[in-house]
Every structure is written in structure tokens, then in C-alpha cells.
Amino acid sequence: MRIFIIMLSVLCTFSSLIAQENPERISLSFENEALEKVLLDIEEKTNYRFYYSRQWLSDIKVSGIFSDADVTEILDAVLNKTVLNFYVLGSKIILTQNNLIYDELPDGFFGVGKDTVEHEEQEITNIPQAPILVNEKVKTQKRVETYRIGKETDYDNKSKYALSGYVKNAKTNNPIPDLSILLKDAKTGVVTDDEGYYSILLPPGLNLLETRSLGIENIFIRVIIYNDGALNLTLNEEVEQLDEVVLSADIYENVEETDTGVEEIDIEESKNIPLVLGERDVLRVATNLPGISTAGEGSAGFNVRGGKSDQNLILFDDAVLYSPQHFFGIFSALNPFVLGSATIYKGSIPIEYGGRLSSVFDLTTKEVEKEKFSGEGSVGPVTANLAVEVPVINEKASVMLAGRGAYSNWILRSLNDESLNDSEASFYDATIVYEHKINENNQVKATGYLSRDDFSITSDSLYVYDNKLLSLNWNHQFKTKTSLDLNFAYSQYGFGIEFDGDANNDFELGYKVQETGFRAKFKSLVSPSVSLDYGISSKLYGIRPGDLEPKGGESSVERLSIPKEQALESSAFISSTIDINDKLSIDIGGRLNIFNALGPSTQFVYDENAPRGEETVVDTLQFDDNEVIKTYIGPELRVSGRYLLSESLSVKASLNNSYQYIHRLSNNTTVSPIDTWKLSDLNIEPQMAYQASLGLYKNINSNKYEISLEGFYKTSDNILDFKTGSQILLNENIEREVLQGDGKAYGVEFLIRKNQGKLNGWLGYTYSRSFIKLDSEFDEERVNNGEFFPSNFDKPHDISLIANYKFTRRFSLSTNFVYQTGRPVTFPIGNFNFGGSNFVAFSDRNQFRIPDFYRLDLGFNIEGNHKKNKLAHSFWTISVYNVLGRNNPYSVFFVTEQGEIKALQSSIFAIPVPSITYNFKF
């Protein structure tokens, strides 16, 4: 064998020398010509003859202009960007695919050892040095695909080459995350990221790769690699008929991920949770998770880990949703049939999000059906929903249209209460989503949303509030290791009041807050163990604090317009996830915020030695349009880590700080539709928070049970609160009515979740405290002697139980039980007479509590038959909200009657509320 190789080498060298003595030179030009046609033209003009396989040349087009050029020069140019090489043997030119033909062997070639890769009965010899030779013996009947990657060169002799690519599902075209790609018998491999991308280093020559993932077919791939290159894979789902066995992907994801305080809500399973009037509400389900609560039943807004309701960033396809609820929090403002995922970040907030202190609610629409017309809807006692998905270009583009509305006015008018005959209470929301997959590297998505609420409990006032948002997203894959997510978003929230009374004081009031934002986020896979997220973002705020107009020609109300506010918030961010070893992984990142309060504006400078007021103004500053009033710079650090104690047990920790430059202003304990917003400026400083978390996470019996125990501690600065009796609406000098103080919150959250079996659900318990301190050197600005006192939403104990029992595949029973400590209130503790008038003396702020809250809901779910071919699949829900008829207090207030102080209690749903809802899907 060695003698034959030596003789072949000598013959090749001799033939090449003969050909080089009389090189043929020709002139040739061609434009976007088939490569095979160019080779035939060369044969006509010279004595050379080409030898190749025609399938190598298919679809290859080349261009070039050559004058009196050597044939080898022409071939070097036209084959440069292909995987083809050539070798001149006398008057014969031999084309090869990927590899080279060598005239001589390198020194010590026969001393190179062999690495053997075995799979079943096949033996593959891999010689990892140039020249790359493959000796392959295949005896197995099993089909193994072979791929040749890259082009061998005589100037590049690396020990390893990079193979990168993208893996997708053959049925859905969705990326396949967390797919293991293993180098057989080498004990190395990689895992695809969330977008389905991977990168692995392989020695030159032949390698055997294997893919592994639950629910996806496992295949073997034979890769002959000559240089860096790409290989995209399309894998089929693995379907197997099993008896009562559930295949679950990422069964240890909650244990292995580095993030702390992350909650994901299963959109489909949320339909089984009984809620008021049978409405499916993902956000209401979120309040049953540890660390998330509301100030009271029928209240809008959320309190996360002791934070205020304005400290939550609620995103709908990356656009901010200022008011995510209808009817003061009774109903969600989002159609449940358009949602695809709901993720809540309470601790480790991703680096691309900023501007809020407590949490991020990341709500995204589902992927729209691109192959067939489909839809989903429901009809209940108060509302009706419908969402349809329409393919526009088969497997490429589609649009989803969704509408939802309430028809409760007829209920109010049919009640035997004359005071409610002229009442009005209705809402609607509409969503449109357009998706277009341009190609493998480019996808676009556009989302539009509109909602409106109208309510009037008295005959003289009509309240209206609405949301509008638009989100445009472009995802581009530059190459196999870097992707770009580009987002443009616009959001607007506004409310209005129309007053039409008996006197001549009719008026119309309007308020509006809006923001326009842009974000560019890059994601790079630096190596199999290191990924990088980085980018920039910017948003422009605009607030119209209030416009008061007289209604009608006889109104005595004077026209008033509060000057607008505007500001620019810009950020740059970067973070990296690093797998230090198999057990330890960390995520570290930084974010730099620059906030500019902009004119036009009139800003007052106050005497620092006196409380703020009209009489303590020492200077008045005027700022022109877009002139910078004040600049705040906020650096943020976010660190989280995970250490695996075992395959199913981990400990996690995180530390982060954050800044918030927009504040919600409200005189109420709970959020109301007429709450206003205020931007930081010369006198209102941005809020700041620091949070540390530590937790244990455990999976039992292959994720049948999930258990987590997490503690947190959070401190806050510049938290906004109000002076007693302050006037917020239509006030040009808000800084005189507010106080800024310190906050602190701490707690422990426990969650046990059962994911499989006839009985599933979760039990959550939270012990947490939330305090605020409003201290000042001036008595007028000091509350409770400057000491920490419980916040309005301080509820030490919170227990939630969600359970669903499946009797059969069609019938199930659901229950929802909630217990919470009563929230703090301020009580009158006496009265006194001064100057002939009676006055009431109140306790320290939030010294007492209203009674504890608890509620039990039950629901019975009936699914239609499971026939595959039917017009529509149906689902009935029969539920009873507040089965026990508990008269839970919404608020406690006090009145004076005949010199006596009386406490009164208001409640929402003080009796059981039955409902029946019909759901359908086609």
C-alpha cells in the first residue's frame, strides 16, 4: 500500500511538471453563467479536459473577465467561493468536492496515529491532520446521513473547525431549544439556545454526531469537516403511542436556569381556574402566585414583593400597557385567546428591561396559524370573546384578529333600582397581529391594540379611559452566532370625565400619557459555554397632565390647561451567561440609564430650610422646548447565579439595583382609572431600589412535583407619597403636595406545584412585610414621627391554593382558595372640641388593619367529545365565585352622624356569584 501511494505521488508530480512547462493562456468573459458552461468553453479553447460529477456544479453561477490569463488563474477565481478544488494532471483537470489532491505527503505522515469512532457495527477512522483522508467502513443497515462541510485549503491547518447552525421542527418550523448535539464517544457536545442555534468545535475529518431531546427524533449525522461551515437541521417530532405517560421537555429547567423569582403561567391550563363571572384572566391567576398580590378585591394594579403598583412594567409584545385591566381590576384588558406566553420576573429581571423597580410582566401573543383558518372564542354572562387566525401567504404570513366586549348595561338597567337605571358600565378591546417569515434569517411581527372603558354610576358623570399601543418587531440572524431583535413601540393611556349636572358647572376633562420607544438587542454565542446579550434602547415620554374645558355655552367653568411634561430616557446594556462548569453558572450584566427631563417648563426653586410652598419659592426657572431641565444618570448592576447540588436540586442567588423615573399619583389606596403620572424633574427625584434574593429549587419524581423556597430583601429610596389632604388632579405644582421617603420589604415565598396526574395545581405561601418611612426636618413633612410604618399593601400572610381534579378526559373540578391578612388602615381614635367645633383625632397612619380576606371559588369543567373531525371543539365552565358568601371588606371609611363617629364597610361580591361560560375552538 505504501509503495502504491509513493508511486502515485511521483506520477502526479511528474505530470504536473510537464503541464507547467507549456501553460495555456486564453481570454474569456462571462456574466452570471453556469459553471459547467464555463468549463466547456475552456475545453473548446484549450487542450484541457475536465473530470467531475455534474451534481457538484448544479445551480452554481459565476462571472468574470480574463485577458490572456492562465487557465489555473481562471479556475482559482471562479471556484474561490465554492467548495470545489481542482488538480491539473497533464492535460486533465480533476475537480474535487471539499478536499484537495496532494502531490506529496507531509513529513511524518505515516507516523500519525488513528482515532476510531464506533457506532454499532461501523468503524470510522479519522486522521485529524492535513491532508484529510477518510477511510470509512460501513456494515450497518441503519441509515446515517453524511454531510461535507467547508473547503480544504493548503494554507489552513487548524486542529479544530467550527460547525454552526440552526435546528427547527419539521412540522411547525419553530426553533428547537435545549437540543443536545453530542460528538459520539468524545464526551463533548453542545445544547441549542432558545432560538435553536448551536456552535461546536470538531477536529478535521470525519465525525459522528448524535442529537438528543425528549419529544424530538434522535438521529446520527456523519460530518466530514474540512473548514469552518454551517449545517442547519430539520428534525421530526417523535410520536409514540404510550399508556398514561407524559413526555416533558426541559424537566429540570426551573432548577438549571440562573434566574431567581421567575414565574411562568401556562395559558392553556389557566382556563380551568374559576374566576369571577367565568372570565379567563391570566393576570388574575398571577396574583395567586407567591410574592404577587393586590390591594383588595376589585382593585386594579399589582403589588410585587412589597412594591407599589406603579413599579411594575407590563409589556404586551414589548409595548408598555399602562392599564391592563377593565372594571377596576375585575376583568383583564387582554383577550385570553391571543396570549401565547406570560412570564413574570420578580427577582432577576433581564438586562434589556429597565425603568421599573419591582417586576416585569412579559406578555406575548401566540404564534399565528399560517396553514389553515382557525379561531377560538367564548360567550359568558357579561362578556364575549372571539379570535380568528387567517393565513395570508401559506406557511409564510398570517394575521390574527381578536375582539372582546362587555354587554353589562342591560343588567344594570334591568335591576329594580331607579338609581341604577341611568348607569353605564361597558368595555371593549381589540387586537390585531401580523406575522411574516420572510426567510430563514428574517422574521417580522406587528401588533396593534385598542381598549376602552365607559362607566357612569351616577346620572351626571361619565368616566372614560382607554389604551392604545403599537409594536413592530424585526428578528434578523446575521450569522449562525449572532442575532438581532429590533423593536419599535408606541403606547398611550388616557382618561376623560364628562360632567353634566343640574347647575351651570358642566365640564369635560381630559388626560393623556404616552411613550414612544426603540430597542435594539443583540444576542451572540461566543462559545458553547458563554453567551452575550447587549444593545441600546431609548424612549420619549409625553404627558398631558390635564385639560379642563367648559361643556356647553352656559357653563361657568373656566378653561384650564396644565403644561405638558416630556422626557427622554436612554440606556445601554450588556450581560453574559457563563457556564463555569457543569454545576456553576452565572449571569452578570450592567445597564446605564440617562434620563433627561425636557422643557418647555417652569420650574421653581425652593428654600431648603423650609417646607415647599408658594411662600418658600426663591427662584423661578424657565426652560424652552426640548431644553434639558435636569439629567439623572443611573448605573445598574444585575448578577445572578445557580449551583447544582444534584441533578434535581439547586441553590440560586441574585443581586440587582434599578431606577424608575416615572411615578403614579393617586390619593386612593388602590389604583383608579383617574390616577395620573408624573415624570422626575428638578424637584422630584427618581426612585431607586436594591434587591437581594436567595432560594432553593427542587424537582421530585421527574418533575412530577416542583418545590421552591426563596427569600428576598429590598430597600428603596425616593418613594413617592402624599401629604394629608393633598390635591393631585389639575395641580400645576405637584411637588408641593408630595413627600419622598425610604422603603423596605422582605419576605419568604414557598411554592409546591404538582404537574402530572389526575390531581394537579399548586399551593403557595408568602410571608412578607412592606414598610415606608417619611422623615423630614420639618414637622409638616414628617409622618408617624419619621419612623417606618406599614405600607397600604402590607399583608404579612398570603396563602393560595389552585387545584384541578380530572374525573375523566372530559370532566374536571377546579377550586381556588385565597387567604390574606387584612391591609393596614388609619382609624379615628377619638374626638375633641376646639373653639366650639368638634374635631376627630386619628391614629398613626396605617396603625390598624381591616378584617382578614378569604375566598373560595369552585368550577366544573365539561369538554366536548374528542372527535377529530368536527366543526368546533367546545368547552363549558360552570363556576361559583365566593362560594362561602364571605363579606370581605374592600375598604373601611368613617362618617359622623349626630356627633357620633361610625365606621362603614364597603364590599365587592359579598354573595356567591354563579356563572356559566361556553368556549369553542375551530
Image (cartoon, rainbow, N blue to C red):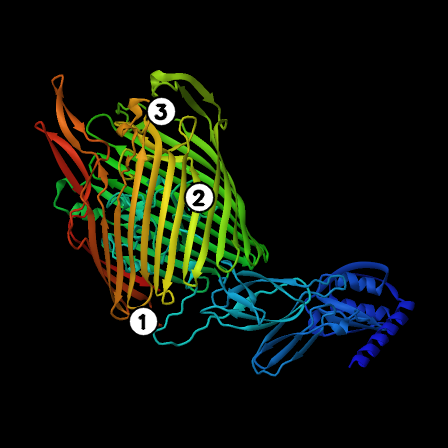
> Pointer 2 and pointer 1: residues touching (CB < 8 Å)?
no
Let me know if residue 639 appears in the view: yes
Image-quadrant location for residue 547: top left
Extreme residue toward the left, this view: 898
Extreme residue toward the right, this view: 21
Q: Is residue 9 above or below residue 435?
A: below
How far across and how far down the image is residue 670, in percent?
27, 39
Q: Identify the element where label 2 is drawn.
A: strand
- Camera-side residue of 227 and 373: 227
Q: Which amino acid does the dot numbered 2 rest on?
A: Asn
Residue 866 tag number: 1
Q: Quadrant of the N terminus?
A: bottom right
Q: Identify the element where label 3 is drawn.
A: loop
Q: Which amino acid does the dot numbered 3 rest on?
A: Asn
Q: Which residue is mark 2?
A: 656
Tell me the CA gap for discs 1 and 3. 63 Å
Q: Residues within 10 Å of mark 3 (few under 14, many from 20)?
A: some
Q: Which residue is mark 3?
A: 733
Answer left or right for 137 relative to 694: right
User: In this rendering, which labeled residue sits more in front, label 2 or label 1?
Assistant: 2
Q: Identify the element where label 1 is drawn.
A: loop
Q: Which amino acid does the dot numbered 1 rest on?
A: His
Q: Quadrant of the C terminus?
A: bottom left
